[in-house]
Image (spheres, grey):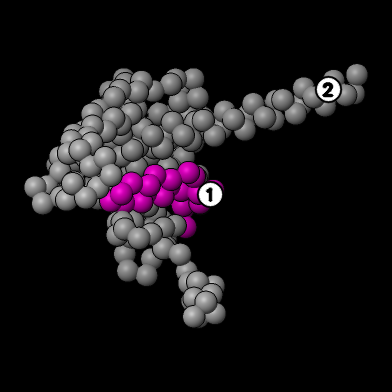
């Protein structure tokens, strides 16, 4: 029996036990007057979360990888050719009980933002200089969710089951107040994380440089 279990586990590909919807987004970088900007979309009134600020992205299609989905969604929403989308790499991602959102950083070097004519899912596009996010921290606000048990939950059979009757979950939500737009939620989370990664790399590079200078002296 143990040998059968061993073979089964050795050949098994680990997957999430829960069923999670898979999404992919692109954090698009563009150059405007020699300065790197992050491009954002404003969701149209014809789709869910109308008026919200977001990145190009959406759910994975059958047989599609996260990276392929990010490219396809960007191509469809911004109506640009995929050859103009250069994937720099994959960033940290968001995992929730219901879904996984993976984020890829893309360089749209040949795109003129003023000439973009996105599809019907996008009401507008705008850009913010990357430097703004490197200098500006979001404000985090706490949102509290209350979980209530269903009547048939067998709390008497659970150790310390009474505490499952009603639970409160606190979630930290980041907000950026921009001049003409409001940025919050997952898009703000990913933007903030991107800025943190850049600042961390810059600090490490500077630290190595200072260390090398001291050794030369």
SS of the residue at dot 1? Answer: strand
Marker disc for residue 213 = 2
SS of the residue at dot 2? Answer: helix
Q: Which portion, as a residue range, is magenta?
A: 77-105
Q: Is residue 125 above or below residue 129?
A: below
Residue that appears at 49% across and 45% down: 91
Q: Is residue 206 above or below residue 75?
A: above
31 part of magenta stretch = no
**Quadrant placement of the C terminus:** top right
Specify the quadrant of the image occupied by residue 199: top right
Q: Can you see residue 37?
A: no
Residue that appears at 75% across and 29% down: 208
Q: CA distance from mark 2 to mark 1?
A: 31 Å
Q: Position of residue 149 (x, y in %)?
A: 15, 43
Task: Specify the farthest residue to the left.
Answer: 151
- Mark 1 — residue? 89
Residue that appears at 21% across and 50% down: 157
89 part of magenta stretch = yes
Given residues 38 and 57, the one toward you in this image is: 57
Q: Residues within 10 Å of mark 2 (few under 14, many from 20)?
A: few
* Upstream in sequence: badge 2 or badge 1: 1
């Amino acid at each position: 029996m143990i040998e059968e279990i061993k073979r089964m586990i050795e050949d098994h590909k680990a997957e999430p036990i829960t069923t999670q919807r898979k999404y992919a987004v692109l954090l698009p970088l563009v150059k405007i007057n020699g300065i790197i900007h992050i491009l954002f979309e404003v969701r149209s009134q014809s789709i869910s979360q109308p008026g919200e600020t977001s990145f190009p992205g959406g759910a994975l299609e059958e047989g599609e990888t996260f990276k392929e989905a990010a490219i396809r969604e960007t191509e469809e929403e911004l109506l640009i050719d995929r050859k103009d989308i250069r994937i720099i790499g994959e960033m940290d991602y968001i995992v929730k009980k219901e879904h996984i959102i993976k984020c890829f950083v893309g360089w749209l070097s040949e795109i003129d933002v003023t000439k973009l004519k996105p599809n019907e899912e996008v009401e507008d596009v705008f850009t913010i200089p990357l430097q703004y996010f490197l200098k500006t921290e979001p404000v985090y606000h706490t949102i509290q969710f209350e979980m209530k048990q269903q009547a048939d939950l067998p709390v008497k059979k659970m150790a310390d089951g009474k505490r499952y009757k009603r639970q409160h979950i606190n979630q930290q939500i980041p907000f950026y107040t921009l001049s003409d737009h409001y940025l919050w939620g997952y898009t703000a989370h990913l933007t903030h994380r991107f800025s943190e990664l850049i600042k961390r790399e810059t600090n490490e590079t500077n630290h190595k440089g200072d260390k090398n200078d001291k050794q030369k002296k």
